[in-house]
Amino acid sequence: MTNISSPFTKDELIPQEEIIEVTKINKDFIIGIPKEIDNNENRICLAPDSIHSLVGNGFKINIESGAGIKSNYTDLEYSEAGAKIVKNKKELFKCPIILKISPPTLQELKMIKSRSILISTLQLNKHEVNYFQEIKNRKLTSIALEYIKEEDDSYPVTNQLNEITGQASVLISTELISKTIYNNGKGLLLGSLSGVKPVEIVIIGSNTIASSAIKTAIGLGASVKVFSNSIFKLSQIQRQYSYPIFTSTIQPKQLTKALMRSDIVIGTINSINSPIVSKEMILKMKEGSVIIDLSIENGKCFETSKLTTHDKPTFKKFGVTHYCVPNIPSRYSRTASICLSNVIAPLILKSKKYGSFENFIRNNNSLKNGIYAFNGNISNKIISQLYGFNYTNINNLI
């Protein structure tokens, strides 16, 4: 009988362990999302659905435990979406990319690793020179969410939040003008009811916030008057609705007449020299009327306005209820978080094809407009002028 030799050695016949290739996650695609500690900030920048999409595309997301609670997202939801829940804040700030809503405090800034990327809002009025000095010292690349600019010159993050602010201002005013055990308003309801005079709303401004407020007020059946110094935008507003809208440039006599008849006044702009609505105008308004000042963060539209908070949002002056809370979208934290997530997640997702987030920054014009520091070099003229830092154009840095 002929022996047939085996083509395999003895060792090769023994079952071998299968070698599975483990894909390493590029450290440039590890993102840390800290819990917001600002009292007025309830949002989170990525919703679980967006986390699921990013993780599925090779990103690693670390989220501080409890970061989504104020937006009604649990740690379990984020964990099931593929995020790693981190309880140690210092560990989380070691991630190469830090993503948050409010700018980090100086103490948080000191936890961020050198040469990391920080993506958050800037909120320039919150900071002093030592804040930006720390950014320089740590050689951070810092991107302001509100200044990210699309190719059509729109600001997607700002526009989304302005839409919410405009709609919310009308809804808040309907609460304030009602009469309940919690609120001593005029007992009025916004709505188109037979035989009932509609509530009169004056809106000052013609920006995105104002347009959103106009749309909501008309939808609820209010009588709307709009004041703005942009004839072009006023014409756009009139063409947009078949519903008749009174529009006027901002003239004291016309504005005073409208204020005297109004139930609600929403201000979306402020004047450089002085508030648009004077104390004398407010004195002529009806008792129990409501003022919503949406420009309070950068000045004020009404002379009698003063900053209030979500905890204590209103005060009365001359019998008129004033609501002057900044960051209104935080009141609607889950909706605002989804809106932010819809802008931020696709932007981050695009970075994958560039091999690193820094390469993505170098090749993406949308982000360039939002960069105010690149590897510690200040690339924002306003910051450099305010705090005496050397300014370098972002195109020269990258």
Image: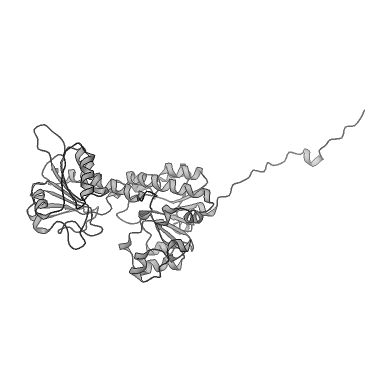
Q: Please name the residue shown 20% across and 49% down the image.
A: 231
Q: Please name the residue shown 8% across and 55% down the image.
A: 283
What x and y, as percent, mark residue 371? Answer: 41, 59
Q: Is residue 237 visible?
A: yes
Q: Is residue 33 visible?
A: no
Q: Quadrant of the N terminus?
A: top right
Would residue 224 be found to the left or right of residue 34 on screen? left
On the image, which quarter does residue 179 sit in?
top left
What x and y, as percent, mark residue 353? Answer: 52, 48
The count of marks equals 0
How is the model colour-coded? one colour
Would residue 63 be found to the left or right of residue 26 on screen? left
On the image, which quarter does residue 40 sit in?
bottom left
Instruction: Give the answer, above or below, for where 129 lies relative to 144.
Output: below
What x and y, as percent, mark residue 327? Answer: 28, 53
167 vs 86, nearest the viewer? 167
Instruction: Give the answer, above or below, for where 328 lies relative to 391.
Output: above
Question: Farthest right residue?
Answer: 1
367 vs 78, nearest the viewer? 367
What x and y, as percent, mark residue 338? Answer: 36, 44
Question: Farthest top residue?
Answer: 1
Q: Please name the residue shown 20% across and 36% down the image.
A: 242
Question: Farthest bottom residue?
Answer: 388
